[in-house]
Image (tube, rainbow, N blue to C red):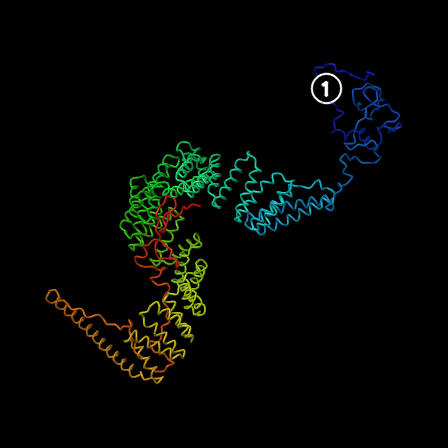
Amino acid sequence: MMENVHLVEDEDDIYSGYNDYNATFDSEELDNDEGFQQAVRTSHGRRPPMTAKFPGTAIGGRPIGTSFGARIPLASSLGRPVTGAIQDGAARPMTAVRAAGYTSALTRGTTFDPLGQSKGPAPPLEARNDDTPEEKIKILEKRVNELIAESCIAHSQGSLQLALEKAKEAGRKERALVRQREQSGNADHINPDLTYAVLFNLANQYANNDMYPEALNTYQVIVKNKMFTNAGRLKVNMANIYFKQKNYPKAIKFYRMALDQISNAHKETRIKILQNIGVVFVRMGQYSDAVTSFEHIMSESPNVRTGFNLILCYYATGDRDRMKKAFQKLIAVPLGIGEEDKYIPTNDDTHANLVTEAIKNDKLHQMERERKSLAEKFIMTSAKLIAPAIESSFAAGFDWCVDMVKSSQYVELANDLEINKAITYLRQKDFKQAVESLKMFEKKDSRVKSAAATNLSFLYFLEKDYEQADRYADLAMSADRYNPAALINKGNTCFVRQDYDKAEEFYREALRNDSSCTEALYNLGLTYKRLNRLEEALDGFLKLHAILRNSSQVMFQLAHLYELLDDPQQAMDWLMQLISVTPTDPQVLAKLGGLHDLEGDKPQALQYYSESFRHFPSNMAVIEWLGAYYIETQFCEKAIQYFERAMLIQPTQVKWQLMVASCYRRSGNYQQALETYKDIHRKFPENIECLRFLVRLCTDMGMKEVQEYATKMKKVEKMKEIREQRVRSGREGSARARREGREGSAGSGHAPSPVLTPPKKERDLSGVDVKPDSGNSSQGNSSRGDRLSTKLKSLPGSNEPYESSGQRDLDASYVDPLGPQTERPKTAAKKRGDESDFADEELGDDLLPE
């Protein structure tokens, strides 16, 4: 049995013989080997077929060939060596050659095809059958996920209605999916996470579309379903909805229920819920309960917003000592930001400088700046709020706040607080104390000095002390040349002196330092307008309109510029935009009516003039136009109400009363016209027009007073002739005296003798010049004095709020309640260093308690 087993002679070299070359395996000479080619083409050298005689075996009557059994050697036709290390006469072991393309049952004449290429291409893949229930369920589930994603994307893009539609469709698809799983018997495979996502998204979209009852019902379905873990947290969302509905008791109830559902491990979430509870108590006026929540937050995880709210609650309750303690807690809150020194580049390390430049304006640094700016805003607002309440006087309270800030991490805010102290003096109309407080900063560092000098320049500018304003504007520029507010104030002083070229330079420099400085851009447009560079002014105001989309002043300036450029259609378009912002401005409505009248559109002009009269029934130009319009259109009865209004506004002007009497006469009401003329004669007995119409009416009506009024008219006319003759002689005498004086001074060199000044021209008691009658006595026609000119005055005029002139240009940029105000350079004054500047009289009104 062991005769066929060969042991390795040398156990140390078990891999010997592998590098020996055997010519039998030389495949390059197989084509020339006749024996091999004959064996391939014929059955020469094939093994006899094997038959199975016993079940369960592959080789029937042969003993299984193993290394331990006897084998019958089967020699090859080529004399190939048998495989395996066997002796002569032993059986050859079986080998597997099917994988290489050989087979034991090879038929005669079959070609050699080891790769099986003669079988043809592989059959095509079987198509997936989408009609099976499982495939339908997978497709539907995928579609539900896609709808949820589309709903979220639509919400992020601002399409709230589309987002809600997608969320509703996802809900319908998900319910269909659940029914299909139940019908197919796979109810155990229902995905609760998908159901939760669909319902949660649907509730959010309901809330975003202000459909609060539907959102609450959907949240209630999620909360009551026991399959959803941690669904109790959604009670925070329900409480937020109740807060929006101003149902504060329910909001507090749900906030507390949500607080019970959240473990102490989620500290930040619990703090936020407590802060919401405190805010709700503030809205309800329960400041003591709000204080409890805010104090707990300040002891656990203090933040500046909660500290500010705590100060507001103490201020509402009037607790001075706790206000001080809360202010100290507020300034002690750590911000968690790094030092600014790390953003300063060094000159030695180039690699470090590149890193510093890269992180100087990254998202983290922007977040740090926003957090610091918010903290400074809360501290400044708190100091201005509690300063009058914590001490006996406002100044003492502000000084205490300044001392506390100086000993904290916000040392740089101390100077800003003192500047705000001066601004508060301005609000209290204590200008002397404000000026004294600001003058204390003249010896401080450049930033604070520039801010104080800017405010002083602004104050003196408002007081029309332009020399002092100019001096402090120079001081502010010398301290900080890059301060745009100082440059604006300097430009305003040049604008006042009508040195528009210099003003343009300073406004341009301010824009170079701060391209978003709207005051400089507005004033530059006004400067171009004064220099008659209308195209450049138009470009400037169009840029300003892109920044301030709803500024009524900018829109009016654009309309006025287009009017100056002879483009009334564009002017009307801009005035229409202006009306959409200030629909009750009577001056804009009157201006728009005037443009339509110039274009010949009388009905449209009537509409705008009527609206202007409705909002401001004291504009004489509008009253005159409306009265003249109704006289021209033969509706004299309607014109009477406008002329009666004019009589109330100008009772000493006889022309409005004459127009009322004329309207009665034109409408055929002669008796009322006669009574009106008699009333006018009693008030203005020397008015010739009134006497002339009285004579005419009495003559036509056959009354006895004709002779009386005719006699009076002759006397008045004679007096008028004497008066005019006296005036003419006085003028001739004064002219002759001036000629004699010039001749005497030229001839003798002596000073001319004094000339008596002629008496002033006497005027009728009516206060108007009397025009002679045309001589036409027809009642249907009106005299020249009765005829009212329909030529419109330009609206607004030189003394209107829009187009101020002279020294009115120098006022602060006060927005008139009746309409936008233009043609005045906007002033600027620094409130807090290099931050926001202001351009109206409400100084420092940018920080108010929320």
For this rendering, which residue is in front, 95 or 152? 152
- Mark yes or no: residue 354 visible: no
Q: Position of residue 566 (x, y in %)?
A: 40, 64
Q: Quadrant of the N terminus?
A: top right
Secondary structure beneath dot 1 equals loop
Image-based side of 89 in relation to 806, left or right: right
- Mark yes or no: residue 610 visible: yes
Residue 748 appears in which quarter of the rendering? bottom left
For this rendering, which residue is in front, 719 or 63? 719
Q: Where is residue 775 in the image (x, y as percent from the top left)?
A: 32, 82
Badge 1 density bin: few <14, some 14–19, many ≥20, Cα 10 Å? few
Q: Where is residue 363 in the image (x, y as percent from the top left)?
A: 48, 40
Q: Is residue 453 above or below residue 761?
A: above
Q: Is residue 99 above or below residue 236?
A: above
Q: How many tags in the picture?
A: 1
Image-based side of 751 in relation to 496, left or right: left
Of all residues, the one furthest to the bottom in this rendering is 702
Q: Tag 1: residue type?
A: Gly
| Residue hosting label 1 | 17
Please give the name of the residue rendered at 30% of the width and 51% of the height, measured from the top-left corner.
461
Image-based side of 574 in relation to 141, left or right: left
For this rendering, which residue is in front, 231 or 556? 231
Please give the name of the residue rendered at 65% of the width and 46% of the height, measured from the top-left corner.
144
For this rendering, which residue is in front, 338 or 751? 338
Q: Where is residue 258 in the image (x, y as percent from the top left)?
A: 56, 40
Q: In this view, does 724 lie above or below 529?
A: below
Image-based side of 62 in relation to 114, left or right: right
